[in-house]
Image: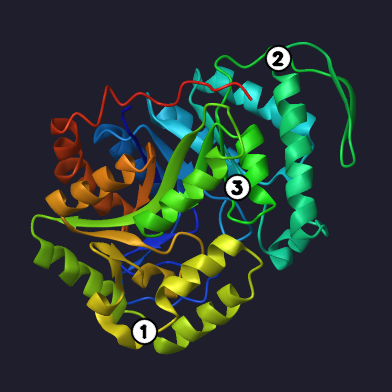
Amino acid sequence: MSITLHWFLPTSGDGRTVVEHFHANRAPAAGARREADIDYLAQIARTAEQVGFTGVLTPTGTWCEDAWLTTSALIAQTKTLKFLVAFRPGVLSPTLAAQMASTYQRISRGRLLLNVVTGGDSVEQQRFGDWLDKDQRYERTDEFLQVVRGIWTGKPYSFQGKHYQVQDATVLAAPDPVPPIYFGGSSDAALPVAAARADVYLTWGEPPQDVAEKIARVRALTDRPIRFGIRLHTISRDTSAEAWASAAKLLDALDPAVVAKAQEQLGASESVGQQRMLALHGGDLSRGVRGLEIYPNLWAGVGLVRGGAGTALVGSHEEVADLIEEYHSIGIDEFVLSGYPHLEEAYWFGEGVRPLLKQRDLLDGDRTLALASA
């Protein structure tokens, strides 16, 4: 099976230093900060399309621009690029979400992918008025996706559950194609929901052996067809030495006080996936750039200040392609990548690594996910 490559839209801002989710890093080096205005995001989207990415992930939260609105503004700025829109089930009704997705599919002519983010941080959830605990949030997500998929059949759909009750819910017309559901979560409460409802299960960039173990756990819970994806950063250069020098620049730009503040905030997260990310580097800036290489060409330095995906593929184009191929060999089919700055790194990867993957017959027409029935 071929792999699918996606890029990332930095809707909280971009720069030549690591821009992290909690906004502790708000004073980067002079000239490094790039605001997430629509012109800059359109430039990244067009670049991602030009160099061969299938889609772009847009995050969700109070620290970034709204994903639905931002990406809908970019539909007319692109031709074939798909938009992997992240959203939180607890902040809108499943009927409204089904309607929004159906409308989006018609307006974009089928370019919507959906990333369901249940939420692993109660403080962030409470900003949206959501007071359920983490296990309850996953229970609600399971019901939410049942309702959304039921409505997408195009027939009136009724549902009576613990969190949702709808009667004869419907939309103007069923979406065509039905948007694939991407879903992440590492806790015991998350994996059964992924196994039952997701088309693509996403994980953050842990070493291959840990990713393989997680894939096996999800597969053991279902006999449905399901694809697996991974979220990583990338620093790819013509030589390995150049790539590691670029990683060292990112590390050198980090203020120890900023790292400490970010680690305090990230350490309070309820997310099992986030805690696994933190364990990879231990918050230790003193390890140096190569001391944070947790697996050959897998670097944990980004996670010192950035929440969520905290590891990067670092190396020559060939080394990065080799590690992607290794992840693919254990079951990863979709790669959601990013880098600082996102504009330049899209070119480095698209022009350096992607041709190598194509030569290895890992890219087959850049086909995106064929819908898997839930």
Q: In which quarter of the image is the C terminus?
A: top right
Residue at the image position 78 percent from the left and 46 percent from the top? 139
Picture quadrant of residue 114: top right
Tags 1 and 2 in contact by the CB under 8 Å rule? Answer: no
For residue 91, say whether it is visible.
no
Q: Where is residue 277 in the image (x, y as percent from the top left)?
A: 48, 67
Above or below, 26 relative to 118? below
Picture quadrant of residue 22: bottom right
Residue 66, which numbered label? 3
Q: What element carries label 2?
A: loop
Above or below, 142 relative to 373? below
Closer to the observer: label 3 or label 2? Answer: 2
Q: Position of residue 8 (x, y in %)?
A: 41, 47
Question: Circle 2: is it few (<14), some (14-19), or many (20+) Cα within 10 Å?
Answer: some
Q: Residues under labels 3 and 2: Cα distance?
A: 27 Å
Q: Is mark 1 on a helix, strand or loop?
A: helix
Q: Where is residue 104 in the image (x, y as percent from the top left)?
A: 59, 25
Residue ID for mark 1: 285
Left or right: residue 169 versus residue 275 is: right
The residue type indicated by label 2 comes to Thr
Q: Quadrant of the N terminus?
A: top left
Q: Is mark 3 on a helix, strand or loop?
A: loop
For residue 268, say whether it is visible.
yes
Point out the tag, 1 or 2, that comes first from the N-terminus: 2
Residue ID for mark 2: 153
The residue type indicated by label 3 comes to Asp
Q: Residues under labels 3 and 1: Cα distance?
A: 32 Å
The residue type indicated by label 1 comes to Leu
Depth check: 12 or 348 in front? 348
Tags 3 and 2 in contact by the CB under 8 Å rule? Answer: no
Left or right: residue 320 versus residue 327 is: left
